[in-house]
Image (cartoon, rainbow, N blue to C red):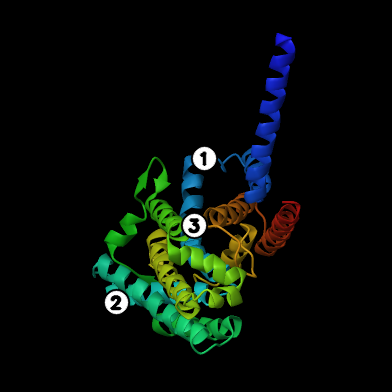
């Protein structure tokens, strides 16, 4: 009798554990891909799991993630911001131009974020008030921001103060400084979405705009605000890219757009709005960063990396849809 009771308890624990594990994978569909990929690269590339490589990987992921947080806000409202990567580059260039080689890093930070906010305010006003289509509008903003970045820099890298370059070498427990900035952004964004009325309205607006109008939500203010925040975070990401690279590059955003949007979608944020989470975006961005880093270490060419990353995005989004239908 006692043995049967113990067996029953153990079975119940196993079932509960299985349900909990299934719930985790359902909410974070990227995990079944991320974990094996990390193990595979650790086995195939001995330098992958070294502290130096992990630090470099986290630094790159941190820059992309900060910009992707803003993109997540926008996509939760069923919008999209194609300009995010170019605004990132433009903010970095203008911030570097104002700082020069001997200016204050704080001035550069303020200028970079302000540039991003200006672009974000323009996008938000045009979408929320003028009713322009987000894709077409932000495609135009993307071209403007990219043109400004190359015009100001004349197409070459711009040097920044020594203090800023040294900040890029600051680490704690082999974790780069900018990774801690990204974690701070993660925590603030999660709090804003989960614990504030503004965050709840974002989900409602993305899920059903008519219902949001019916209950009296100021949807234009909510819709406009996410583009402003996306611009500001793109500006911050541009500044972090300068810290990471030690220079401001006009083309720094060129390879990042698909990574930013792909990471957000891979993390489970719906392009139709109303579904997604910031921590899931973090996992999506981390997976793409791990893929890029690992394939580099294995000697893959750029175009081969694109094929692999595209397949992973397709696999991850397909898995997310399948789990969503099953839930």
Q: Nearer the viewer, mark 1 or mark 3?
A: 3
Q: Is residue 311 above or below residue 100?
A: above
Element under label 2? helix
Q: Write down the residue under mark 3.
A: 60
Q: Are marks 3 and 2 in contact (CB under 8 Å)?
A: no
The vertical placement of 65 against 258, above or below, is above
Q: Are marks 1 and 3 in contact (CB under 8 Å)?
A: no
Mark 2, other Cα within 10 Å: few <14 / some 14–19 / many ≥20: some
Q: Earlier in the sequence, mark 1 or mark 3?
A: 1
Residue topped by disc 1:
50
Residue at the location (59% across, 67% down)?
A: 261
Q: What is the C-alpha distance between the residues marked 3 and 2? A: 24 Å
Q: Report the front residue among 157 and 171.
A: 171
Residue sticking out furthest to the bottom: 130
Q: Quadrant of residue 15?
A: top right
Q: Disc 1 or 2, which lies upstream in sequence? A: 1
3D distance between C-alphas at marks 1 and 2 = 37 Å
**Could one spot residue 220 in this view of the protein?**
yes
The residue indicated by pointer 2 is 98
């Amino acid at each position: 009798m006692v043995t049967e009771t113990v067996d029953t308890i153990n079975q119940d624990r196993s079932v509960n554990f299985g349900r909990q594990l299934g719930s985790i994978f359902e909410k974070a569909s990227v995990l079944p891909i991320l974990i094996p990929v990390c193990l595979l690269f650790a086995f195939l590339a001995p330098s992958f799991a070294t502290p130096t490589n992990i630090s470099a990987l986290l630094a790159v992921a941190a820059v992309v993630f900060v910009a992707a947080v803003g993109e997540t806000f926008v996509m939760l409202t069923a919008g999209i911001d194609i300009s995010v990567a170019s605004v990132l580059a433009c903010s970095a260039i203008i911030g570097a131009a104002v700082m020069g080689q001997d200016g204050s890093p704080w001035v550069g930070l303020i200028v970079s974020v302000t540039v991003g906010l200006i672009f974000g305010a323009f996008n938000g006003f045009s979408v929320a008030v003028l009713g322009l289509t987000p894709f077409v509008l932000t495609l135009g903003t993307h071209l403007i921001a990219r043109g400004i970045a190359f015009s100001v820099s004349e197409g070459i890298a711009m040097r920044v103060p020594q203090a800023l370059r040294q900040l890029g070498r600051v680490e704690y427990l082999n974790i780069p400084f900018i990774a801690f900035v990204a974690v701070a952004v993660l925590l603030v964004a999660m709090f804003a979405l989960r614990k504030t009325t503004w965050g709840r309205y974002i989900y409602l607006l993305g899920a059903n705009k008519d219902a949001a109008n019916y209950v009296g939500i100021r949807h234009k203010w909510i819709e406009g605000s996410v583009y402003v925040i996306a611009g500001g975070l793109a500006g911050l990401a541009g500044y972090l890219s300068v810290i990471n690279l030690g220079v401001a590059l006009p083309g720094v955003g060129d390879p990042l757009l698909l990574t930013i949007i792909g990471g957000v979608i891979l993390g489970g944020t719906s392009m139709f709005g109303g579904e997604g989470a910031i921590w899931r975006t973090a996992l999506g961005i981390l997976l793409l960063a791990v893929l890029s880093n690992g394939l580099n270490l294995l000697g893959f060419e750029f175009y081969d990396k694109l094929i692999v990353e595209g397949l992973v995005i397709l696999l991850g989004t397909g898995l997310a849809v399948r789990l969503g239908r099953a839930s």
